[in-house]
Structures are given as structure tokens and as C-alpha cells.
Amino acid sequence: MVHNEGQAAAPEDRAYVIQLVFGTLAARALHTAIELRVVELIGDQRKSATELAQEAGTAPQPMLRLLRALAALRLLEETEPGTFAVTAAGTLLDPGRPGSMTPLITSSGTMEEMMKPGWEHLTDSLRTGDTSFMKVFGKDFFSYLKDHPERSEGFNEAMSQATRSTAAALPGAYDFSRFNAVADIGGGDGTLLAAVLREHPALTGILYDTAEGLSQAPQTLRRDGLEDRCSAIPGDFFVSVPQGADAYLIKSILHDWPDEKCVTILSHIRAVLPAGGRVLIVEPVLSEVADPRAVGQYLGDLNMLVNWGGRERTRAEFDAMCRLAGLEVVSVMPLPGPGFSLIEARAA
């Protein structure tokens, strides 16, 4: 709701701001609900706080307090005093259900440990345009991961979880049948490329990332029986990308970097793109004016500022960046699920 100048905030506006202030506490409540298996224990039934406390191994009164907090967050519904059922949103906290968000939620703890210090210096980043992560840790985010392999593994897992919803949507949303080979640039453990190859058996694949980024790729390719159809090649996309594909897929990479580095990456892809080939960029695409329905994209943009030095972009900004790399955007298609679009580009 937009208020005129001088108009007093409504009570619901105040409640909304309070919810924002306590957002970190809400996230911790979600972690605890998953740890205690609250949604799994309720299932499709209605259960009392006393029953759930006994099954989860907690005291009854504190469990009631957690359940009411989850109900206020619209993950549960208190159908009568002290009795709770799972809402549609709450089912996303059940790891046994399709589309569950529990892996993303549980892996976010590792991400928060690395990202929170940068956010504490958001004001400095806004004043200088510099990345706060560098100020806090003395090195950029990816150099930090290289020096902390245990955190690199957690980061790779978090990225894999975040990719799974896209992997479920992309193979059926775009016609890959016209291509012979797809290269996934910065493809990590291969979650997205494996989904495309499974859906399109005639395709072969090239998975390209740093050695650290590819560390879990052999398991993915072996699990999906793709070892003979997909090669994993270590390298640096700031130096070059491999030849041999007619579709180059690049997901959640460009938003990590400022424009000039993105142009370098895209230029390397353009240099090996055959006639009729396509570059398929999977990223959030911001509206030309702020859209409150996409709050995660704008918070993600600030996260890019403080921790990576990258940014989220509008369609016009993708157009301009691609032109500098010798590419032309031919279509932008929102993908099913939250937040991502497929930007299709060809040689200009």
C-alpha cells in the first residue's frame, strides 16, 4: 500500500515492520521445526502440542509456544486451542514431500555464518560501493572458499539445493532437442546439466568449473548414469571456456560479478559459439521498477553487493551487457518456480 505524504501508518503496516525486524528469529524457528520434525510428526492429521512434545522429546509448554509461532508464520494452523495442522506452506518443511525446501533451509546456516559479517557493514558498502566481505575477511568470497574446503563443501551443497527447483523446471520449459551438446559453465556438481541430459537422451554434456567447484560432480554423474555422456573439465571461465557445444548454459554465475567481468565470461563463450548456437543464461531478472512480490531478488541484490561484488540485473542491463560481449538477447522467459528466468542469446 502506498501512503500519501503525512498519512499515518496503519496497524498492519506496523505489524509488518515488526515481522521484518524479527526475521532472523523466524528463520531460527524454521530450523528448529525441521530439527524436531514437527511437520513430519503432524503429517496430514491434527495433533496437540502435548502429543507433539512427547513424540519430539520436548517439554509440552515450550512446544506449544513454538507451534504458535509457526502458526503465526502461516506454516501451521491452530485449529482449536493447543491443536495444530500443517498448512500448504508448512508442507515445504517436510523432507519427504516433493519440492521440499528443507535442504535449502538447513544449508542456509553455513551460508549465514559466511555472509552475516558482510551485512553488518552494509552501510559502508553503500557509501563506497566496495564489497564488505573483503573488508571483514581480507580476501574475496571465492578465495575464502578455496582456503576453507569444509565451507566450500557446504557452499557447494547449498548451491546444489538452490539449483534443484530450476533443474526440475528447465528441461521441460525449453526445447533442447535442436542441440547436440550442452556445456554448463560454472555448473558445480552437475545438478542442472544432469537434469537436462536425463530429459534429452540424445544430448551430450560438458561440465565446466574450477576443480573445487567440480569436487562433487563425479558422484552426480555416476548416480545418474551419465559418465559416458558428460565430461567434467576443470578450468577458469575468466581465461577460456571449452569448445564442442552448441548450447552454453550459465546459471547463477553472472550475478556474482560486476559488469566488466561478466562481459569477459560471455566474450569467452562467444568466441567458441558455433553458428546457430545459443547462450542460455539462468538468472533473476529484475523488473524495471521495484516489485514487492520479488523481495527475495532485491535482498539478494544487496547480498551480492556486500559479499560477492556482483549484482542482480534488469532486462535492459542484460541486453547491454550481452551486446558488449558480441551477443544479442532474443528472448527472456520466466521459469516455473521462484525467481529465475531463462535469457536466450545468440551471436550478434
Image (cartoon, rainbow, N blue to C red):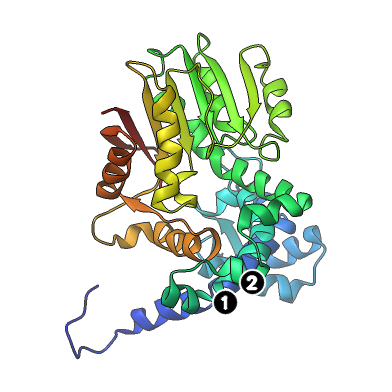
Query: Which of the two marks, 1 or 2, is nearer to us in this view?
Result: 2
Residue 74 visible from this viewpoint:
yes
- Based on the displayed image, in which of its 4 quarters is residue 217 positioned? top right
Q: Earlier in the sequence, mark 1 or mark 2?
A: 1
Give the Cα distance between marks 1 and 2.
10 Å
* Front-most of residues 114 and 244: 244
Residue type pointed to by label 2: Val
- Based on the displayed image, in which of its 4 quarters is residue 109 positioned? bottom right
Residue type pointed to by label 1: Glu
Residue 18: image x %, image y %?
A: 46, 81
Q: Which residue is mark 2?
A: 136
When the figure is inspected, residue 66 is found, relative to residue 307, above or below; the finding is below
Residue 205: image x %, image y %?
A: 55, 19
The circle drawn on residue 312 is none
Q: Is 21 positioned to the left or the right of 280 in the image? A: right
Residue count near mark 2 (Cα–Cα under 10 Å), binned few <14, some 14–19, many ≥20: some
Residue count near mark 1 (Cα–Cα under 10 Å), binned few <14, some 14–19, many ≥20: some
Residue at left offset 42%, top offset 77%: 127
* Front-most of residues 33 and 1: 1
When the figure is inspected, residue 305 is found, relative to residue 274, above or below; the finding is below
Residue at left offset 59%, top offset 66%: 133
Q: Is 48 positioned to the left or the right of 341 in the image? A: right
- Based on the displayed image, in which of its 4 quarters is residue 175 positioned? top left
CB atoms of marks 1 and 2 within 8 Å: yes
Report the residue that reaches farthest toward the front: 239
Q: Which residue is mark 1?
A: 120
Residue 182: image x %, image y %?
A: 49, 21
